[in-house]
Amino acid sequence: MSTIGAAIIGCGAIAPLHANAIQSMEGARLVAVVDTDPVRADQAAHDYGCEAAADYRQLLGRTDIGIVHLCTPHHLHAPMAAEFLQAGHHVLTEKPMALDVPSARRMQEAASASKGQLGVVFQNRYNAPSIRIKETIDSGIMGQLICMKGIVTWHRSEDYYTESSWRGKWATEGGGVLINQTIHTLDLLQWFGGEIASVTGSVTTDVLNEVIEVEDTAHACIRFKNNVRGLFYGTNAYSVNSPVEMELIFEQGTLLLRRDCLYLWKDGQETLLSEPVSTAVEGKSYWGTSHKRLILDFYKHVREGRKFWIDASEGIKALEVIAGIYKSAVKPSN
């Protein structure tokens, strides 16, 4: 089996999950890490036994790098992805794939014109409860899905934003709690619900209004073309990072996600269907535990010459939901 060389662009908090996944794979090698902070790049290179660089352009066209992982601030995803795709590399980008839908469309066009693939990191689709929920919906074993809700109550401090100048700004983050923290839950809602008919909602800045120019709290009602209704609430204004909660009501029962465990409520009884295999979690526990599964699957698709299923067209869908919420929240001027 030939070895696939990889590079990680951006050595922030999420980068170790990518690096550790690469190093766990047979037939994959982390060749280089890139960060504009040379100290951080050098430290990552030391930790992972690879090269360090300060400018990602140094890697463009290198034949020993097949897959590039984008772990950079949001506003850099689209331009970097386009350059690497044009140079023939495969690109796996962290969420959101871009600042907005038009930028994401340009990434999609670059991927279509490239011999490389573009994958988007929505790792929560690989969580065991998510897979079980999707299988239940598709099989119809519990009848039709009627409605569902997703709730994210997390905490972000002032320091979280002041320590990273790109966060909390429209121009570089593209939004607040919607596009950064709750995008995974919105992605699951649209993945479960199918084609969307309409989105309405509101955004507010309840706690961090003196620190950020974007929202820290949002709610939405998503109406799907199959008449399913999805409700969503997300905030960074809680005092702790509470586990994500989801509820899906079917004709013949209810599925509930609590603390990464999936339960079935039916005929007055609650049954545990799925629970985390291990309590060992890389990074932050509330991120979910499926980064490695997604990364390994992306490499498998690349190696086998198959199209990765969470591609640009899939990555855009959550951005479209977010754009719908923002559009609905803007009140017309008199």
Image (cartoon, rainbow, N blue to C red):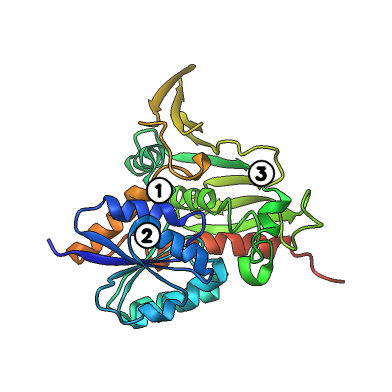
The residue under the point 74% across, 60% down is 212
- For label 3, the residue is 155
Q: Could you give the CA–CA distance between mark 1 and mark 3, rounded to whole angstroms?
A: 23 Å
* Tag 2: amino acid: Ile
Residue identifier under label 1: 125
Which secondary structure lies at badge 1?
A: helix
The residue positioned 58% from the left and 50% from the top of the image is: 182
Q: Crowding near pointer 3: few (<14 within 10 Å), some, many (20+)?
A: some
Q: Nearer the viewer, mark 1 or mark 3?
A: 3
- Residue 164: x %, y % from top left: 64, 61
Q: Earlier in the sequence, mark 1 or mark 3?
A: 1
Above or below, 48 relative to 117: above
CA neighbours of label 1 inside 10 A, class few (<14), some (14 to 19), many (20+): many
The residue tagged with tag 3: helix, strand or loop? loop
Please state the horizontal and vertical placement of residue 332, each as a whole percent of the image.
80, 69
Q: Earlier in the sequence, mark 3 or mark 2?
A: 3
Q: Amino acid at mark 3?
A: His
Residue 132: give x, y in percent of width and height.
Answer: 36, 37
Quadrant containing the N terminus is bottom left
Q: Which residue is mark 2?
A: 310
Q: Is residue 31 visible?
A: yes
Task: Point out the frontmost of discs 3 and 2.
Answer: 3
Question: Disc 2 or 1, which lies upstream in sequence?
Answer: 1
The reply to whether dot 2 and dot 1 touch (C-beta < 8 Å) is yes
Q: CA distance from mark 2 to mark 1?
A: 9 Å
Residue 122 visible somewhere in the drawing: no
